[in-house]
Amino acid sequence: MKTLLKISFALLILITLFSSCHKDLDVKYLNLPDRETALKNPEDVYGIAKSGFYNWYMTQNTSLSMRMAMWVAADQGTCSWANSGMWHLSDEPRKPFNNDPSYTYAFINQNYYAECHGNLSQMNDVLQKLNEGMQIGYNGQDTKLVRANAYMIQGLTLGYLALIYDKAYIVTEYTKNPETVEASPYTEVMDSAITKLDKAIELMDRKSYKIPTDWISGNDFRARDLAKLLRNYAARFLVSLPRNKQEYNQIDWNKVLSYAEKGYDQDFNVYMDGVNWKSYFRHYTVRPGWARIDCRIINLMDPSYPSRFPSDGHNPPEADSKDRRLATDFTFNSSNNMKPERGYVHYSNYEYTRYPLEVSTQTGDAPIFLKAELDMIKAEAYLNTGNKQKAIDIINAGSRTLRGNLNPLPDNTSEEDILKAIFYERDIELIQTGFGIAFFDMRRRDYLQKGTLLHFPIPGKELNVLQLPYYTYGGVENADGVNVSNGGWDK
């Protein structure tokens, strides 16, 4: 474990060098390499806390993570280009993930894992100083703000480690001997994440103090509003954690409702300024000639449209749908410039053009957590706690009718069809919003193509340093329904 932390600290130096160029953030990043000096001054501890959301957000949206690869592996997007592992993780039939450090795109696994643990390390440092009695701001007025923020980043970071990896290291401000810590299974990592979010919510709930506007770009939150947003994330995490349908059936839906009913009932966006705040995921998945929308999605909107691109390479005719979003959110392109030798399965004639974020300048609002997602979490929770009518009412009052202009569900709709309507909205309405939504939704329904890994392994580089046995997941020959999908949406 000691060697793992050294890797994380080394990566933090790189993060420091990168982030310190962004003067608008006014973050000094003095904790490395002279950690003790940086943590000696309250102003610098405040600066580390201030950088927390930015570092977390950029970790989520960099092209150096597995986010794009997961998007195409879920058959919501499609791409034949190898960048960020997209071709390899969506190739058919599915193959094992290459976890060797020499793999060209090993960084999508290694960087994300290390940066998440690096973010945790920073927040642990902040909390340790506060626990020692350090006061932040005039008369300590910012101490609670900084503490709550540190808990928030701990919770968000641990939550995504639990969603993405089979196991991760839970190292907190209370860990006395990090070298003795062993990796914990994803369920325990998620328990820790929820505990941290609960602590942040407790400190923010019903409080009127403001979150500085430069902490979360484009947002002017009061503490109580941010507490509501963290409830959204807690609900998202609980819903997204299951690796298969069996685990999905074990979700504590009452607990989900306890968060969702008090959640942030508005769209949450982060403003991209094209300089400091960017979304590389959005940049590459809307860039002409790169990734497109998988035929599976268009087929949901127009069942007469092929769910897979024709194997002879001939373009299907333009789709037609009663769902108005086919016209407002998607653009038909009659040509493809992907590589045919990698399979026509990667082809698509549809690009996603809903959001105005400029590809070249990367400016504008980037959606992170839509009200529509919270609505569907509530509807799914009500359905699974026996309140079928409440679920129908939420669906009928939401994006299905407001943006899709589809007919409302009748009161006698079956539970199976209600669930189909929920996942339809999640598939159509939540594209390019939260990290991994499509992957997690397909995973918990046993819909990922057979052979798709259900979570990522500890990166091979970490395994080598820690002298642990090499392992990986994926490949149709390894489909066990536990670590590798044995299902498929096309069955």
Image (spheres, rainbow, N blue to C red):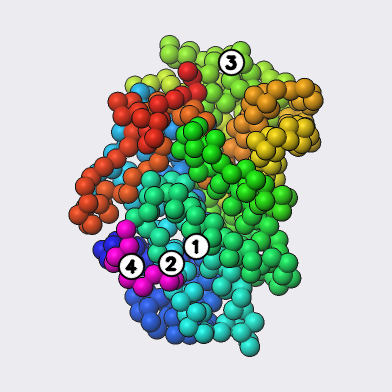
**How far is the residue under mark 3 from the one under mark 4?**
54 Å
Amino acid at circle 4:
Pro
Amino acid at circle 1:
Gln
The residue identified by callout 4 is 178
**How far is the residue under mark 1 from the one under mark 4?**
16 Å
| Residue 165, placed above or below residue 297 | below
The residue identified by callout 1 is 154
Classify mark 2: helix, strand or loop.
loop
Classify mark 4: helix, strand or loop.
helix
**How far is the residue under mark 3 from the one under mark 2?**
50 Å
Badge 2 crowding class, 10 Å Cα cut-off, few under 14, some 14 to 19, many 20 or more, is some
Image coordinates of residue 88 in percent, x first then y, are 35, 33
Classify mark 1: helix, strand or loop.
helix
Mark 1 or mark 3: which comes first in sequence?
1
Q: Residue at x 64, y 66 (%)?
A: 202
**How far is the residue under mark 2 from the one under mark 1?**
8 Å
**Direction from residue 489 to residue 7 in the image, left or right:** left
Classify mark 3: helix, strand or loop.
loop
Q: Which residues are magenta?
A: 172-182
Q: Residue at x 35, y 28 (%)?
A: 479
Q: Is residue 266 visible?
A: no
Q: Is residue 134 visible?
A: yes
Badge 3 crowding class, 10 Å Cα cut-off, few under 14, some 14 to 19, many 20 or more, is many
**How far is the residue under mark 4 from the one under mark 2?**
9 Å
